Amino acid sequence: MALADRMTEEASASARAFSPAGGKWQGRHLAQFIIKGLCFLCAALSVLATVGIIFILFSESIPFFQHTPFLNFVTGREWNMMGSEKVFGVLPLLTGTLLITLGSGIVAIPLGLFVGIYLAEYAHANVRKVLKPMLELLAGVPSVVFGYFALSLVTPALRGGSDFLAEVLPTLSPMLPQFRPANAAAGAIVVGFMTLPLVASLCEDALSSVPKALREAAYGLGCTKAEVISKIVIPSALSGIVASFILALSRAVGETMAVTIAAGSSPRLTFNPGDEVMTMTAQIVNISKGDISRGDIRYQSIFAIGLTLFVVTFTLNIIAQRLVRKMARGNG
């Protein structure tokens, strides 16, 4: 009876301590309230920052579009800020950005996917521990280094390969591009290698998250390793894989320094990978380096280009979210 009475008293004391009138309950409630408030503040700041960026882009772009009609800006085939009659057509910048983005995707997407498959399915644990950090170190290389890497190695290799093919297969010579010192192909290749760690890491995470039971069930049915990967693992992780592709393309759209050095600074409407091109981000850097006063039409064009870049990136993100949700529902 004494033991039972003592246990009852201890339970009553604990209940009183954590009751609404107890100090411990009030302290925990206050701590939860503070944490909740801090989390809400962080979320609100991120939303306010996004709203502020959109507001600045639109407000600063309005004077530009009063000078240059929106339709002329979107469909214009020439960008020339010199002389008395300045022409602002975004199509040359848009095509340059498109060449770099699609070219980098051709490099990064298949390589990153196969690297992710190797790390998740084939690599030994010790090999994975060494290879994955080394791959992620590639993401820490400054973009300026990639730009000069393109000038000193990628472009000479492209020129040498083109000359070799022209000698071996003379019939292909008219179809081979003539690579300039700065060209879109070199810029696309280095941006592809810059986004390769992102694709490989996210693909490896998506493939590793597939339950092991699915693999074992497929092996139990007599499937080979290649069949398990192609018919079970990749379809199950497809939403994450596609998300990594879209994120890599979004990163390529916003790349600046490597593209400025490797692809050049000549805004021209061309789809030839051997020509010098200029992306939207490179044009923003080019305008910002000059001695341009606030309120000048050239200064206002920065925000018009930025607004176009924002719309492109925002569209890519919406497409990525819809694809991921659709694939997740399909796999579910």
Image (tube, helix red, strand yellow):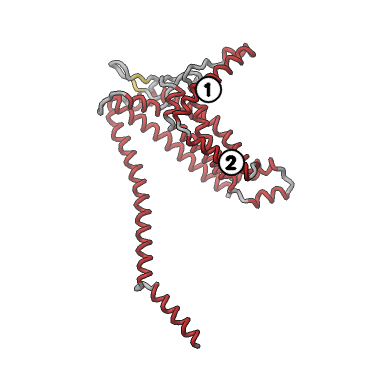
**Could you tell me which residue is drawn at 36 percent across and 50 percent down?**
42
Packing grade of label 2 (10 A; few <14, some 14-19, many >=20) is few
Q: Is mark 1 on a helix, strand or loop?
A: helix
Q: Which of 225 and 72 is in front in this view?
A: 225
Q: In this view, does 129 lie above or below 259?
A: below
Q: What element carries label 2?
A: helix
**Could you tell me which residue is drawn at 56 percent across and 40 percent down?**
132
Residue 266 falls in image quadrant: top left
**Could you tell me which residue is drawn at 55 percent across and 48 percent down?**
329
Packing grade of label 1 (10 A; few <14, some 14-19, many >=20) is few
Residue linked to disc 1: 153
Q: Which circle marks residue 130 in the picture?
A: 2
Q: Where is residue 46 in the image (x, y as percent from the top left)?
A: 36, 46
Q: In this view, does 27 lie above or below 203?
A: below
Residue 79 falls in image quadrant: top left
Labels 1 & 2 near each other (Cβ < 8 A) = no
Q: Position of residue 257 (x, y in %)?
A: 42, 28
Cα distance in 3D space between marks 1 and 2:
27 Å
First in sequence: mark 1 vs mark 2: 2
124 left or right, relative to 6: right
